[in-house]
Image (cartoon, helix red, strand yellow):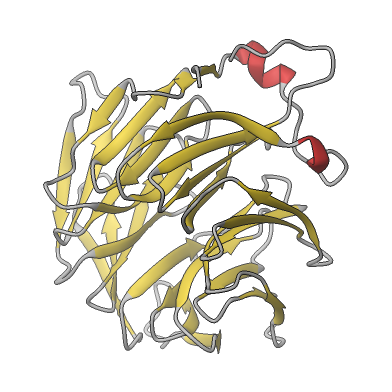
Amino acid sequence: MPDLYITETDRVNHERINHDNLSRLRRLATARFGWISQARWSPGGDLLAIAGGDGIALYRGSFGGAPRIRLTASAAPVKDIAFSPDGAILAAGSADTTVKLWMLTSSKEFESKTLCGHAGSVEAVVFSPDGRSLASGGADGLIRLWDVASGEPRGLLEGHDDELTALAFDQTGERLFSGSRDKRIFSWRLNTEAKPTALGEHDDWARDIARLPHSNALASASKDMTIRFWNDGGRKPAVVPAHAGGVDALAFSPDGTTLASGGRDNMIRIWNARSRRELRLIDGHSRPVLALDFNPTGSMLVSGGGDNRVILWGLVRANCATRI
């Protein structure tokens, strides 16, 4: 399938995905990439990063076919990626125990620096809302906090009994949420000596967490085949059966009304984030869906699967031509 050109005109011509138009959601373009672990849009929406066993592929201005730019973090697979809030830095956690920061706006093309400290594979990375701090979690069960400007360590969080699988900051950057193979979801108050608060746990290992935009409510995905919705008030979570075999990936739409989930049934499911009712089932991958992300305008959804395919989903305004 030909490239999709993500120009300013095309962003206008693509409708924001919402509950009323989900029936028209369709595949726009497809690319192949080895052993996909994560897919992320830049804050400006003009850059799409795909991470996996072959490093990082960057699509700028178009999507489909071979990527315009490739970054190699190491010889080991890249397990997670995150853009800084201003889009200037791409962080990559790798199976070789390191975190690499790529300076995307540097005058020196692809300049980077490497952060060392974990004793195992780095499975999750996330920037604080102000972009000054980075949190990383890994197979060693530890969360490390880093000063982005200097690359120096800022703290170490210990509490989980197994590998870290997912991280998310709250709106203010004062709290950090984590999910682990030990099944538990923790809330950490940073800059204090307090132990983490256990929000609760799944019946099997937690694979992903996503924070509801403009809120500190969370959704978590687990091998126990459920999505759990955690509110900010400490009440018991709502438990929603989701994907046979387990849930691997979650992504909220930018307006917070919609949640996309992917799992071991090879399906993408679209949910009403408030009522937790399933709205649409999308059959596009032949293996588990491992990565999901909405673009910043909410007009496109990217999915990555164990079938080594990255698919871009969206809808075009009626009577508008699309450049694919």
Residue 133, horizontal then vertical, whole percent? 35, 54
Query: Is residue 45 rendered to the left or right of residue 259?
Result: left
Which image quadrant: the C terminus? top right
Which residue is rendered at x = 25% and y = 24% of the image?
A: 106
> Is 1 situated above or below 203?
above
When asked about the image quadrant of residue 262, the answer is bottom right
Residue 85, horizontal then vertical, whole percent? 47, 41
> Is 280 situated above or below 203?
above
Residue 185, horizontal then vertical, whole percent? 50, 80
Residue 198, horizontal then vertical, whole percent? 51, 88
Q: Is residue 176 visible?
A: no
Nearest the eye: 176 or 40: 40
Name the residue furthest front: 286
> Is 217 situated above or below 183?
above
Which residue is rendered at x = 44% and y = 65% of the image?
A: 167
Q: Is residue 267 visible?
A: yes
Which residue is rendered at x = 46% and y = 55% of the image?
A: 287
Nearest the eye: 113 or 152: 113
